[in-house]
Image (cartoon, grey):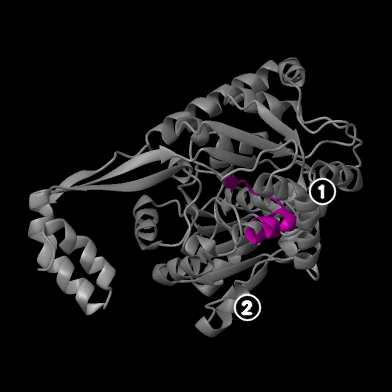
Amino acid sequence: MAYLARFYDPQDEELPNLLARNTINSEGLTERVSAILAAVKEEGDAALLRFAKQFDKASLSELRVRETEILEAKGKISDDLKRALAVAYNNIFSFHTEQLPQAEKLSVRPGVELSRKIVPIQRVGLYIPGGTAPLFSTTLMLAIPAQVAHCPSVVLCTPPDKDGNINPAILYAASLCGVKEIYKVGGAQAIGAMAYGTQSIKAVDKIFGPGNQYVTEAKIQVSSSCCAIDMPAGPSEVMVIASPASNPDYVASDLLSQAEHGRDSQAMLVVCAGEKEGFAFLDKVEQAIERQLAVLGRHEYLLASLHSSRAFVHPDPRRCAALANAYAAEHLIINMEDEPAEKQLLDWIVNAGSIFLGPYSCESAGDYASGTNHTLPTNGWARSYSGVSTDSYLKKITVQKLSKDGLEDLAPTLLTMSEAEKLTAHRNAVAIRLGGER
């Protein structure tokens, strides 16, 4: 059975259609999300409680997770998972600590001193998806850099189950990162609560985290009016660049591990080879997909995702890199079974959220515990956005200090430029400090 549509040597004019994302019906999405946000803005907690019953089937008496619930979560997860989370925490913490920037200080000329003051964002909101796969790993990915950046106030929102409970692994991961302000709120309404504030939830300065199309649309809407966001992020995606020397089982596993995220996820494959050799390798990958599907769950997501996934074959490595740059994948796996070839492709790549190099760098490592962040730009936004990092939680404020001599030295330049722009008050602010008219 063929799972991936195949294309050999696609032409540039074909790429917009061939590289289009797998999207589900979004008709009326903007209006529905706008209505949810408006309700949260107007009604506050009452709207959140109503939406919890409507969307999560949960009847809640309070929104905030009690401290006792957080403490009890520790006893509800296995020791193996605790050890795994500890390893992941240490790796993520170490890598994100290395990302802390140094404040610059420079005298550009005598009497003109410039610097940057680096400060954490004061209150950040973290959105952790629930649903079919409660992402406790995302809790680490978002909360650890906030911890490293020393953000003084961190709030976490995640949807409850129908009994009004939060997945204990999410609560345990949050406690590892020192997050204590946690609310049982999901979906677009959680984004509205963090952006506008309610009776229970104080508004935040920036919202982080992935989510479904409702969450994504809500983030986009609030970012245009009142609250910063990490990035636009939609359904998850991967592109694998391989060669006929690659292990087809590894390639198939990477495609499937991405496809299982959801029906609207996408798994793309680029094979660097001639037509005959490349299509023969694709046959092996399809057979490997068939074998692995036989022992995997979540078929309703895997098959829907694969239906809109595609495979490309091209003999020119530069063209393969160009395909990858045109797609700008959230996750890009370069698995050529040839280190020089992989390094060459890496040098040519300029658009990707995160790159996984070599046959053993499976995307699962980055999703969970290698140390890099898995909150990444999707839907082509890797052309202009980076993934979440410690830097995402910091602000850089420029500082300048001029002495009188420094201003004297710079005055001819300032006066000339302000006069040329016809901004006389600007000119006056310089001249008045130096004895009036100059």
Q: Who's the residue at 17% across and 66% down the image?
A: 414
Q: Position of residue 423 (x, y in %)?
A: 28, 73
Instruction: Give the number of callouts.
Output: 2
Residue 205 falls in which quadrant of the image? top right
Task: Decide: is 102 above or below 237.
Answer: above
Q: Is residue 277 left or right of residue 288?
A: left
| Mark 2 / mark 1, whichever is N-terminal | 2
Q: Who's the residue at 37% across and 46% down the image?
A: 396
Is residue 362 located in the magenta-colored stretch of the structure? no
Q: Are marks 2 and 1 in contact (CB under 8 Å)?
A: no
Amino acid carrying mark 2 in the image: Asn
Label number found at residue 375: none
Badge 2 element: helix
Task: Decide: is 408 above or below 135.
Answer: below
Q: Who's the residue at 75% across and 52% down the image?
A: 41
Q: Position of residue 339 (x, y in %)?
A: 37, 50
- Residue position marked by numbered label 2 in the rendering: 17
**Mark 2–mark 1 distance (CA, rounded to whole Å):** 43 Å
Q: Quadrant of the N terminus?
A: bottom right
Q: Is residue 258 left or right of residue 87?
A: right
User: Which is more toward the observer, 409 or 15?
Assistant: 409
Q: Quadrant of the C terminus?
A: bottom left
- Residue position marked by numbered label 1 in the rendering: 43
Rate crowding at label 2 as few (under 14), some (14 to 19) or many (20 or more) other CA atoms within 10 Å: few
Outermost residue on the front side: it is: 436
User: Which is more toward the observer, 376 or 58?
Assistant: 58
Q: Who's the residue at 49% across and 25% down the image?
A: 90
Q: Is residue 173 left or right of residue 397?
A: right
Camera-side mark, 2 or 1 = 1
Is residue 210 located in the magenta-colored stretch of the structure? yes
Rate crowding at label 1 as few (under 14), some (14 to 19) or many (20 or more) other CA atoms within 10 Å: few
Write the start and end of the magenta stretch as one range.
Answer: 206-221
